[in-house]
Image (cartoon, rainbow, N blue to C red):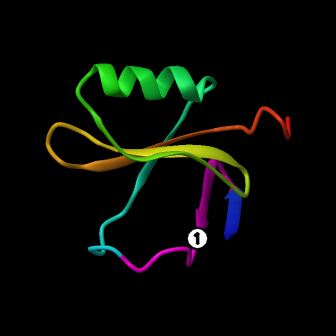
Amino acid sequence: YASFSGAGLDGGFTTESPAGDGGLLVVLFSDDLEASRAGVAAAGGVIVRDIFSFPGGRRFHFADPNGNVLAVWGHDPVAG
């Protein structure tokens, strides 16, 4: 995993899994990852990858009702 940050833009690259369909993954930030996950599920989102740790924090992936896959990340509360 390699991350970058600057000029108001943060991101990262990983080789963890095979390339997908060539689309991008929009990643949103949350101060409370568990509450955001519950809210997504309650609103009809389908959790496609449950909360997991990665360099820089934790996140989960979900599909919205139209099938678009997005992610939500938050800081790791243990790491601070």
Which quadrant is the C terminus positioned in?
top right
Verify whether residue 71 appears in magenta: no
Name the residue at the front extreme.
Answer: 50
Q: Between residue 23 and residue 48, name the one nearer to us.
A: 48
Residue 56 percent across, percent down from the top left: 73, 52
Q: Local crowd at mark 1 within 10 Å, few (<14), some, or many (≥20)?
A: few
- Residue depicted at 52% across the width and 20% down the height: 35
- Badge 1 is on which residue? 13
Quarter containing the N terminus: bottom right
Compared to residue 39, the image places residue 17 above or below, namely below
At x 14% / y 43%, what residue is drawn?
A: 66
* Residue at (85, 41) in percent of width and height: 79
Q: Position of residue 27 (x, y in %)?
A: 47, 47
| Residue 76: x %, y % from top left | 74, 39
Label 1: state its secondary structure. strand
- Highlighted range, magenta: 6-19
The quadrant in which residue 55 appears is: bottom right
Q: On the rendered structure, is 32 left or right of 24?
A: right
Image: 14 above or below 24: below
Taking the image as shown, residue 70 lies to the left or right of residue 58, namely: left
Rendering quarter of residue 77: top right
Residue drawn 30% across the image and 75% down it: 22
> In the displayed structure, would residue 75 be above or below residue 36?
below
Q: Amino acid at mark 1?
A: Phe
